[in-house]
Image (cartoon, coloured by chain):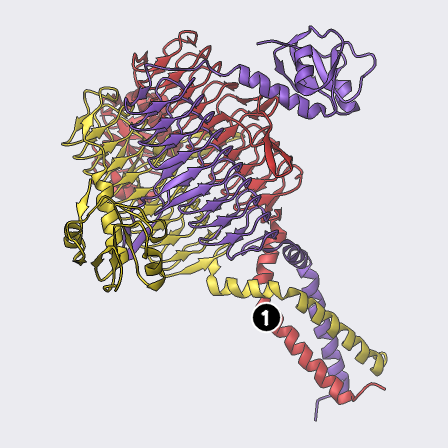
Chain colours: A red, B purple, C yellow
Amino acid sequence: MAVTLEELARLVGGRVIGDPATEVSGVCPADEAQKGRIAFATGPEFVEKLRGSDASAVFVPEPIDDLEIAQVVVEDPRRAFFQAAALFKEQSAPAPGISDRAFVDPTASLGAEVTVFPLAYVGAEAAIGDRVRIYPGAYVGRGVRIGDDSTLFANVSVGEGTLIGRRVTLHFGASVGADGFGYLQEGDVHVKIPQTGGVVIEDDVEIGSNTTVDRATLGNTVIGAGTKIDNLVQVAHNCKVGRNVILVAHSGLAGSTVLGDNVLLAARSGTKDHVTVGERSIIGGMSGVRKDLPPGSKVIGYPAEDHMLWKRQRVFLAKSGELVKKVRDLEARIAELEKRLGKDD
Amino acid sequence: MAVTLEELARLVGGRVIGDPATEVSGVCPADEAQKGRIAFATGPEFVEKLRGSDASAVFVPEPIDDLEIAQVVVEDPRRAFFQAAALFKEQSAPAPGISDRAFVDPTASLGAEVTVFPLAYVGAEAAIGDRVRIYPGAYVGRGVRIGDDSTLFANVSVGEGTLIGRRVTLHFGASVGADGFGYLQEGDVHVKIPQTGGVVIEDDVEIGSNTTVDRATLGNTVIGAGTKIDNLVQVAHNCKVGRNVILVAHSGLAGSTVLGDNVLLAARSGTKDHVTVGERSIIGGMSGVRKDLPPGSKVIGYPAEDHMLWKRQRVFLAKSGELVKKVRDLEARIAELEKRLGKDD
Amino acid sequence: MAVTLEELARLVGGRVIGDPATEVSGVCPADEAQKGRIAFATGPEFVEKLRGSDASAVFVPEPIDDLEIAQVVVEDPRRAFFQAAALFKEQSAPAPGISDRAFVDPTASLGAEVTVFPLAYVGAEAAIGDRVRIYPGAYVGRGVRIGDDSTLFANVSVGEGTLIGRRVTLHFGASVGADGFGYLQEGDVHVKIPQTGGVVIEDDVEIGSNTTVDRATLGNTVIGAGTKIDNLVQVAHNCKVGRNVILVAHSGLAGSTVLGDNVLLAARSGTKDHVTVGERSIIGGMSGVRKDLPPGSKVIGYPAEDHMLWKRQRVFLAKSGELVKKVRDLEARIAELEKRLGKDD
């Protein structure tokens, strides 16, 4: 759907230079510009790319002379561009409706303007909020509750006992509410501990493709509001993840991990079970946290330690050849001294 | 479904203090107690939580005075609690039946009391045992055989050539029997080696969400009886995994790895291809095994080595600053001695 | 379907010893030989296994005396065996056809001899090439284009904005075209950057089970022709992966990574965002690349460095106990010298 520059300028709080009735229907990068789309420019190198380009308009921080295409002048062109992108994306959303090729259990309740695509499954007694979208192949287990404006993309699985908040997004193949990994060892045999708890996903959480969040043994695994989880991340049973946490791809939390608000786990990092990480801590890439960390920690390595110590150890190792040489040299000098002084008597 | 305390006491081998006709319909943690549910207490701190709580009953190791709620006295309250949890979970299982919204190939054979949910797929010549449950979005390829009492949760994929034993559980999105990763290099081009083997999953195996187990090039990839695999684990083609092995989340086995019985791979650890790990070995977290290991090994690091050596190296690195300082100090002392003795002649 | 040895010999450029009308219908390993199948032997140890075995024929490099079963003599028996395996696999492919239990949007276009299985989903305006196969539970989003002879196995998800080439294979649960992981931080809140770009998968690419390839913020994430990706790999938004690259299981590319042609990432290795890795570089297992690498690099460790340096550091650490002992010894010898010389004056 096309939007006029006048409308866009109103949305982003900017002003139009050129024809305000110019219509655009999408965004484009400055170096892959397309007709009917709007780009953004934050510096001279962008502007060069736009001269003679096919873009129909551009967000700029200040008016640019001699540019053929229309401009929307706005304080933060990058942010305005993202706002426009979000608008166009929202406009291309599917029309609501419940496909008769989906399976919706008669005991499930659906809010207003819900979209259930063909081949999606909504189980008994599930409660689906307004404007929720459930894509093909998504599975909503018995009694699951989903808040308004949430989206389950294709092939997502949400197990019994899960409570999902508002404006939550689950990407392709994400798994929420499968059994946690808990066994009692009896001799050589691993006897399953029934996982009867649930999962609570609070508002505004995003969970990446093929990421897994397991249900608690008892009580709930919790993902705090505003937390964003990347692809292929593991959140084990009984974890309590704070608000606005970032879990980057391939990171993992062992059972009963507690993360404070605003913690960041970089790619491929993880925690031992029952560890507590204080708020605003940063765990470096490929690191493993084995003990509790106070708020504001910045650690890396395995076992994870203060990042300055870790860096010093890297430098030490890089120079280890010199150290070995120096010790060998000292040894020779001492031998020489001993020789000159003769045998001890 | 509710159960009386009398019935529960019989199940777990305990005795009731209070009204044996009291009904409970689920379990709950002591600190999130709910009416109609039974908790467990193993020590004084639990008992405090239960005073005045909403729980209807509690498993205890010895009678507790002055507790308002009914008690079931049993030797191991935690174990009894898990037994009760398993009972309630079993009771809440879906009623068997083949949905007419599922696709079941007419040449597939189904045992007694099988459950096939809407939107599940069972391919040609598949053979499904008694009481098997196949959830929405699960895919059973041509000719796959599944033993009695196994469960395939939503969006699981099981490829042609797979043989699954009894009481096996595959969690959301698990992938069993996809092609192994094998190529012949011809110049710069990677020519696919056809993967024509299969996968054998023996009895009582559990496979976590979004875990992948690839089919063999020839012969079979094998997961031994009683082995438990966590989420997001990779088992490559031609691996032979022993019995009662534990593979924790994000661990991975390269092609043709052989694991003895009762081996444990901690989170994020892995093996090089064609490595053999002796039974009862423990591979530490974030470790990579690059050579064969005898039975009972306990290794960590990359390349993985004896865990005591690894710990000593961590201590060495932690003290590396002192070592550098000490060498610098020795250097000064030697220089001083050399100065005092004068030039060598 | 059975094939005569005469036909097989023609396919692989070999000649038959024995009855050329002998029929085989599959391949088998020499040590698990089966009637009606053909094995291969490259050396004497294979031949021993075949004496008295059930195999109906064998590929050999030279004629073998006194073997009861038919032989196909060919320069490279292993390669011939793989060619035969590929032939039998192709023969067992499903018959083309569009199931009326699939959902195919009326605005989608389908090429010739396409197979769409029951419970697969093909969205609006999708364009599917000739002989494409789409298995149960696979999801093809709006406007996705798929080239001739590609295969989407069960429960694969392909999002809007994805362009897939010819002869591409996506294994169980692979996710292509989900949103990249991009946020603007505003105070404590992570504001989503709309991901409006796409994904381009070029010809002859293979993507493993439950692997994730995210769509670009703008422009495209690109996987070059002939690249092979194993299971559980993460390719973040905006990455540009070259041709004939190998990404082994659990490896991961952070956003905007650029990989030259023929790069190899071993298992569990990864790159920092915006890193460029020159062609034909090899990244060792469990390694993390944090800076640009020239062509032909061979690195390992975290941060990844030249593999020879890394090995030297491993040796240094292994001998660190000796070093500490030697320094302690030098200290004692210096103290002794100092004592003999008396206090400095």
Residue positioned 60% across, 31% down in the render: A191
> Which residue is disc 1 drawn over?
A322
Occupied quadrant, residue B75: top right
Label 1 residue SS: helix
Measured from the top left, where is residue A29 in percent x and y? Answer: 30, 37
Q: Could you tell me which quadrant the N terminus of chain A lies in?
A: top left
User: Is residue A316 shown to the viewer in this render?
Assistant: yes
Residue at the limit of the structure toward the bottom, as seen here: B345
- Residue A240 image position (x, y, % from top left): 60, 28
The answer to whether residue B186 is seen in the rendering is no
Horizontally, is C118 left or right of C22 in the view?
right
Q: Is residue C338 left or right of residue B175?
A: right
Q: Position of residue B25 (x, y in %)?
A: 61, 11
Residue A276, quarter of picture: top right
Q: Chain of mark 1?
A: A
Q: Name the spot of residue A178 as percent of width and height, x first.
A: 50, 26
Q: Quadrant of residue C48?
A: bottom left
In terms of depth relative to the viewer, which is nearer, C235 or B105? B105
Is B190 rendered above or below residue B58?
A: below
Nearest the eye: A80 or B131 = B131
Query: The residue under label 1 is which amino acid type?
Result: Glu
Comparing A85 with B225, the one in front is: B225
Instruction: Say left or right for A276 vs B110.
Output: right
